Amino acid sequence: MRVALLLALAACSDLDAQPNYGDAVAAAQQRMHERFKALDRAEQAIVMSDLARVQQEAQLLTLFEEPDVLAKWQPFFESVKDAARPLAHAKDPAAAGKLIAEVGRRCANCHEATKAKIPLEQLAQPKPDQHLATQMLRHQWAAQRMWEGVIAPSTERWNEGAQMLAEAPLTITAESSALGIEDDVAKVRLLARRGLDPKTDRPQLYGELLATCAHCHHVIRDR
């Protein structure tokens, strides 16, 4: 990430002319961190069908400025903000899921263009058992790895999450018709299996996955 910021903040010939260059890099790093955390919070809010929180975090994304970057990098930051604006006005969690996936795609475009290496935290998988709460934690873990796979972008993280989600068990209650979510359960597994195809449009698929998760959680919460 630091390398990308160094490239973006100034041309090599300008380094000696900037006495506060280190401060500028540190400030840009902090803004990138805040931007990532806002996007991450929005993604988690979609899963929980918290539309107000999604809109709030997306609005923050539209306000970030990068005044010190070179002109050639500015379009990448503007592209992310452009994608965040519709998310800030999403009408429902399902629509928000698809919109945030496009924000993730724009982030990945910038990271690829600048050859940024995104530091991804190593989080241990929750140990499996038959309790629904644990199964949901494992689903959350898998979805988060896929989200990182979109943003970084990282094939390793994406496949790690998709593989777990494709095989993750659910309680018999969730798979029965008692709650009316059997279609959502089947779709999550189908999408996860499709995600393992290297030709898959990952952001688009992840948007569909988030929309499905949001619907399922909304039904369960209301019951």
Image: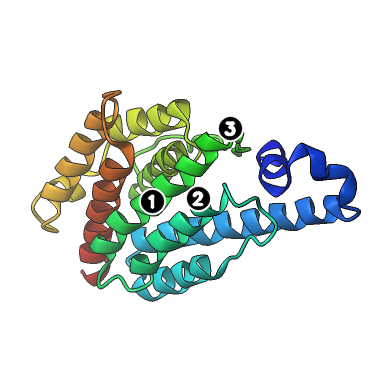
What's the mark number on residue 76? 2
> Residue at left 54%, top 70%?
63
7 shown above or below 198:
below
Q: Secondary structure at mark 2?
A: helix
- Alpha-carbon neighbours of circle 2 within 10 Å: few (<14), some, or many (≥20)? some
Q: Are marks 1 and 2 in contact (CB under 8 Å)?
A: no
Which residue is at a point 44% across and 36% down the rendered structure image?
A: 149
Residue position marked by numbered label 1 in the rendering:
133
**Mark closest to the chain's N terminus, 2 or 3:** 2
Q: Is residue 100 left or right of residue 56?
A: left
Residue 130 at x, y = what percent?
Answer: 33, 40
Distance (Cα) linking label 2 and label 3: 13 Å
- Residue 206 picture location, percent across and down: 31, 44
Q: Which circle marks residue 115 in the picture?
A: 3
In the image, 58: left or right of 86? right
Q: Earlier in the sequence, mark 1 or mark 2?
A: 2
Instruction: Nearest to the eye among marks 2 and 3: give it.
Output: 2
